[in-house]
Amino acid sequence: MSVKHIAEVPVEPVAAGTATTRQVLIGAGEGPHFALRRFIMEPGGGMPRHTNTVEHEQYVLSGRATVGIGDDVHAVGAGTVVFIPAGTPHWYRAEGNEPFEFLCVVPNLPDTIEIKE
């Protein structure tokens, strides 16, 4: 069991991203099956088109973004739920003047990230 406050979790830059950080709220050492991560993209920030070998389940906490999933493009904001199947190209671009924040759940399996741009 693990109980902690988000302020106790280190914030780390996302190397492939622009003005993007993440926190691993629950990692493999705490949750045997899934990891829970929080991503924060500052205004104008984002992630390039890429694929992962694991699926993503996401819940938008705040802000707005344009998200590309495969050939589809979506405007998302607080309360939006996003599912990205494993191997599907996807990208993010924060919109507006406030940070875009979301929770992302992924299986604790090996994950290879491939940038597609």
Image: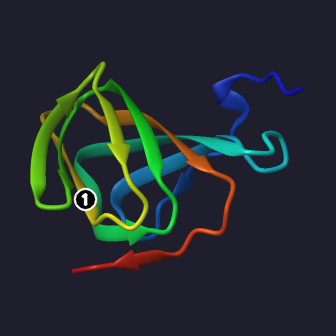
* Tag count: 1
Question: Residue at label 1?
Answer: 91
> Residue 71: x and y, percent?
11, 61
Q: Please tell me how crowded label 1 is: few (under 14), some (14-19), or many (20+) other residues with Cα within 10 Å.
A: some
Within the image, what quadrant is residue 5 found in? top right
Compared to 53, does 66 lie above or below? Answer: above
Q: Is residue 30 left or right of residue 41?
A: right
Amino acid type at circle 1 is: Trp
Residue 31: image x %, image y %? 78, 40
- Vertical placement of 99 versus 79: above or below? below
Q: How is the image coloured?
A: rainbow
Q: Position of residue 57 (x, y in %)?
A: 45, 40
Q: Is residue 117 above or below residue 96?
A: below
Residue ID at (64%, 27%): 6
Q: Which residue is nearer to you in this view: 12 or 61? A: 61
**Quarter of the picture holding the N terminus:** top right
User: Residue 70: x and y, percent?
Assistant: 19, 61
**In front of the other: 104 or 57:** 57
- Residue 82 shown left or right of residue 65 in the figure: right
**Residue lying at 50% horizontally and 68% vertically, measured from the top left:** 53
Residue 33 placement: quadrant: top right
Name the element at disc 1. Answer: strand
Q: Is residue 26 left or right of residue 37?
A: right
Identify the residue at image location x=34%, y=78%. 115
Front-lying residue, 100 or 33? 33
The furthest residue to the right: 1
* 12 w.r.t. 40: above or below: below
At 43% from the left edge and 61% from the top edge, which residue is drawn?
86
Point out the image quarter for the C terminus.
Answer: bottom left
Q: In which image quadrant can residue 75 be found?
A: top left
